[in-house]
């Protein structure tokens, strides 16, 4: 089966989603012309990329729960050349689309390179190492993803997981900020919450205030291992 | 609207001068080819070395489409003393990716100069621009049904022949020593002049891509791994596709076998019985290529224990060492050489030969066989999932193709890597008489402790190997100055004398291979 067909078959179009807290955040954005412009951006279609494994479900839950009126497509990724060439064509041809994702290191390295080669505007790059005891998050982001970064940091604090987070914010002289939190006795569901928050935040790109993401669905597997997250616009 | 304020500036350049330079670039190239916004530059900052992204943050990136534009760019750079870091496809991942040598340099990205200018199916030559990828060239050969074969490194599909050759990279076919197969360059010098090497300067000449040497000093090599010019066209030779291609693997069960492997293969390689740049890969390299993740077998910290590696080998049918080689030619030639190879392994008394038929569709055999046949694929990126965490630096010391040397290097590297809790993930790529011992120093960049350990480990690898009389042939941007020191003060003085003569304003990629007029104290 060729990659395009596989993508179509696996792709799930989810249009017109609405999430909790929509009205509040929309109202606050509407009062500020600059923020309104950012809000308008969120109507662009979103393509979300993940590896085809169970631990990515929490991220997908977050993406799906985000408030955006554009279409949402989910696709799985692989190291196969057919997938990469299909994505390359898509990235070169499509315009006005956000591509967000949480994938393994190999796929992430390739996808970010495709984005650069296509001249995409990259708002977010994240490196995540997550075990049951602790998580490490290394973020490089622009102002457009400030809301996502703030949301992720806040949720890591709220859900009480042990973590180290290092964020470099490009656009203000590359400022660095760090968060270190040491807590134990955290429930599995809270350990996996970061992926829901991340998916929710990236799919809300452009918003400066992002409503809280839903709690991770019971029964989902917490995402542990190494991941690359990204958000860019083509 | 106020003037744009730039967060990152080139060394010694103030906001005002930089703004003027950017305005000049915009006038020359158009706004869409002058990238200064953070979201346009973030992707250029993705590095795999364990150093902060900020140290390699560019101040801007330019994209050019013609030689004339590049000539005008260097003129502006000279006027405002702006350093530029040139990339072709920028996929030199374990050697620094697309990021510049140091903070503030402007990236000159030649990805849009991606024309295949000429392929001669009779003389088996090609002439390409910097942005051409191996996949693009492969597709061209396929579309035109040309019986020619490419030689490419493992990131084959997305890397390009010009960039790889200019960095003296290697591939896995009989044409695997890429710089040997290069023939003719066009180079924009720092003063804006355009130089053609070899026969390229002769008016009306048509042998630019067939005769390397031209007349007088041969200078192509000066432009590789250097910062003396910007290569805008490169010619190289293509191998005729042979009627018969026979890839094979030889599996060895003991790490101690490396010396015997080299001793038995070297005569076959020098005599061209095995004509390709064959590979001897260790178990963990193969595990990555077979999509194995460390966490599937081991959740602990530090080095992967030997018994775990043995279990992976047993499960995946890979050896502690795995030779990949191929025979090329007519049916008769291949049959004769196959007999010689199998006799040699039989006489050695160890090593299990695996043919393509026996391997079937299994990885890593499948992707290795493709690479030795010049077919692009991305399977080796699986290495990045072995440990995970986005850290990768190639440590690539050269060794004699002698069993005792390879054994010594392997043990030394493993000892140092293991001391820092890192795995030995290595392969030897066999030239005629030398070996590129390529080790992927894989680490988790998001783990502060491992980040520091990997950097310290790389330093110690360089120091200890130097003490034993070894040096690397290529290195990532964070360690270029250190490696240049290994090659001695006289070479460095000569390199800087040439730099002063060709680029007195130090605008072309300062720091590349340790060549930087501003910091050199020789």
Image: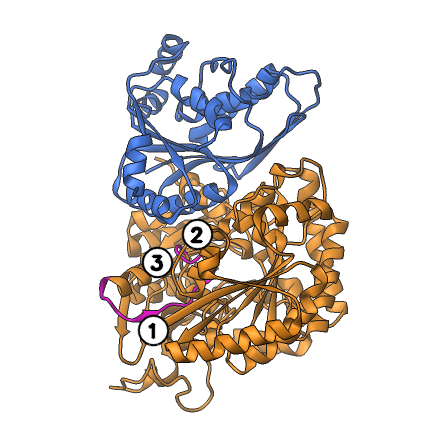
Chain colours: A blue, B orange
Q: CA distance from mark 3 to mark 1?
A: 22 Å
Closer to viewer: mark 3 or mark 2? 2
User: Which is the main secondary structure of the residues drawn in magenta?
Assistant: loop
Instruction: Report x, y in % for residue A183.
Output: 70, 19
Could you say which disc has been placed on residue B166 in the image? none
Quadrant of res A223: top right
Quadrant of res A180: top right
**Marks 2 and 1: same chain?**
yes
Label 2 chain ID: B
The answer to which of marks 3 and 2 sits earlier in the sequence is 3
Segment colored magenta: B143-158
Label 1 chain ID: B
Instruction: Report x, y in % for residue A215.
Output: 51, 13
Closer to viewer: mark 3 or mark 1? 1
Classify mark 3: residues with Cα within 10 Å, few (<14), some (14-19) or many (20+).
Answer: many
The residue that label 2 is drawn on is B361
SS at mark 3 in the image: helix
Q: CA distance from mark 2 to mark 1?
A: 22 Å
Left or right position of B135 against B7: left
Question: Disc 3, disc 1: CB below 8 Å?
Answer: no
Question: Disc 2, disc 1: CB below 8 Å?
Answer: no
SS at mark 1 in the image: loop
Left or right position of B178 against B409: left
Label 3 chain ID: B
For image coordinates 27% across by 79% down, the residue present is B122
Q: Nearer the viewer, residue B503 or B427?
A: B427
Could you say which disc has been placed on residue B243 in the image? 1
The residue that label 3 is drawn on is B135
């Amino acid at each position: 089966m060729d990659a395009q067909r596989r993508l179509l078959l696996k792709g799930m179009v989810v249009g017109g989603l609405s999430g909790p807290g929509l009205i509040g955040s929309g109202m606050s954005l509407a009062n500020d012309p600059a923020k309104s412009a950012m809000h308008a951006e969120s109507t662009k279609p979103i393509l979300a990329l993940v590896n085809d494994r169970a631990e990515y479900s929490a991220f997908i839950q977050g993406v799906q729960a985000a408030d955006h009126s554009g279409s949402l497509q989910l696709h799985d990724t692989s190291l196969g050349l057919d997938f990469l060439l299909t994505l390359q064509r898509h990235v070169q041809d499509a315009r006005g689309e956000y591509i967000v994702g949480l994938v393994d290191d190999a796929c992430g390295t390739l996808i970010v390179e495709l984005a650069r080669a296509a001249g995409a505007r990259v708002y977010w790059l994240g490196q995540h190492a997550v075990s049951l005891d602790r998580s490490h998050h290394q973020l490089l982001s622009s102002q457009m993803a400030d809301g996502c970064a703030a949301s992720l940091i806040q949720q890591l604090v709220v859900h009480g997981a042990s973590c180290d987070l290092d964020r470099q914010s490009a656009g203000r002289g590359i400022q660095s900020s760090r968060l270190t939190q040491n807590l134990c006795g955290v429930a599995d569901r809270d350990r996996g919450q970061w992926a829901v928050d991340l998916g929710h935040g990236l799919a809300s790109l452009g918003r400066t205030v992002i409503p809280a993401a839903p709690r991770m669905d019971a029964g989902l597997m917490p995402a542990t291992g190494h991941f690359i997250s990204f958000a860019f616009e083509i | 609207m106020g003037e744009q304020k730039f967060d990152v500036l080139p060394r010694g350049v103030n906001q005002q001068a930089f703004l003027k330079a950017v305005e000049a670039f915009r006038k020359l190239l158009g706004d869409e080819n002058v990238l200064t916004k953070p979201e346009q530059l973030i992707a250029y900052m993705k590095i795999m070395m364990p150093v902060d992204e900020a140290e390699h943050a560019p101040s801007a990136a330019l994209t050019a489409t013609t030689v004339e534009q590049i000539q005008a760019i260097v003129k502006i750079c000279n006027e405002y003393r702006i350093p530029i870091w040139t990339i072709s496809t920028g996929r030199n991942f374990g050697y620094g990716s697309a990021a510049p040598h140091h903070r503030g340099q402007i990236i000159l990205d030649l990805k849009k100069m991606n024309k295949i200018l000429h392929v001669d199916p009779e003389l088996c030559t090609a002439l390409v621009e910097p942005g051409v990828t191996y996949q693009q060239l492969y597709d061209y050969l396929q579309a035109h049904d040309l019986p020619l074969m490419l030689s490419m490194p493992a990131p084959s599909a997305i890397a390009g022949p010009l960039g790889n050759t200019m960095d003296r990279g290697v591939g896995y076919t009989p044409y695997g020593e890429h710089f040997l197969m290069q023939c003719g360059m066009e180079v924009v010098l720092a003063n804006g002049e355009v130089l053609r090497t070899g026969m390229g300067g002769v008016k009306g000449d048509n042998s630019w891509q067939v005769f390397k040497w031209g007349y007088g000093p041969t200078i192509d090599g000066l432009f590789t791994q250097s910062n003396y010019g910007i290569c805008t066209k490169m010619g190289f030779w293509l191998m005729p596709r042979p009627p018969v291609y026979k890839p094979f693997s030889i599996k060895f069960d003991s790490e101690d076998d490396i010396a015997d492997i080299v001793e038995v293969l070297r005569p076959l390689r020098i005599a061209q019985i095995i004509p390709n740049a064959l590979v001897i890969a260790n178990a963990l390299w193969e595990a990555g290529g077979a999509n194995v993740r460390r966490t599937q077998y081991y959740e602990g910290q530090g080095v992967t224990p030997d018994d775990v590696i043995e279990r992976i080998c047993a499960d995946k049918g890979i050896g502690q060492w795995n030779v990949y080689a191929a025979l090329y030619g007519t049916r008769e030639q291949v049959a004769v050489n196959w007999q010689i190879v199998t006799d040699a392994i039989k006489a050695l008394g160890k090593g299990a030969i695996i043919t393509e038929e026996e391997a079937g569709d299994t990885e890593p055999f499948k992707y290795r066989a493709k690479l030795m046949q010049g077919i692009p694929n991305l399977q080796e990126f699986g290495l990045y999932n072995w440990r995970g965490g986005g850290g990768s630096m190639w440590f690539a010391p050269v060794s004699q193709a002698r069993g005792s040397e390879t054994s010594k290097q392997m043990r030394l590297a493993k000892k140092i890597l293991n001391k820092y809790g890192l795995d030995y993930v290595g392969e030897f790529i066999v030239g005629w008489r030398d070996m590129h011992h390529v080790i992927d120093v894989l680490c988790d960049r998001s783990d502060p402790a491992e980040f520091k350990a990997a950097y310290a480990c790389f330093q110690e690898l360089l120091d200890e190997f130097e003490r034993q009389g070894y040096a690397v042939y290529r290195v990532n941007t964070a360690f270029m100055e250190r490696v240049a020191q290994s090659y001695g003060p006289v070479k460095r003085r000569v390199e800087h004398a040439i730099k002063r003569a060709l680029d007195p304003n130090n605008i072309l990629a300062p720091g590349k291979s340790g060549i930087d007029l501003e910091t050199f104290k020789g």
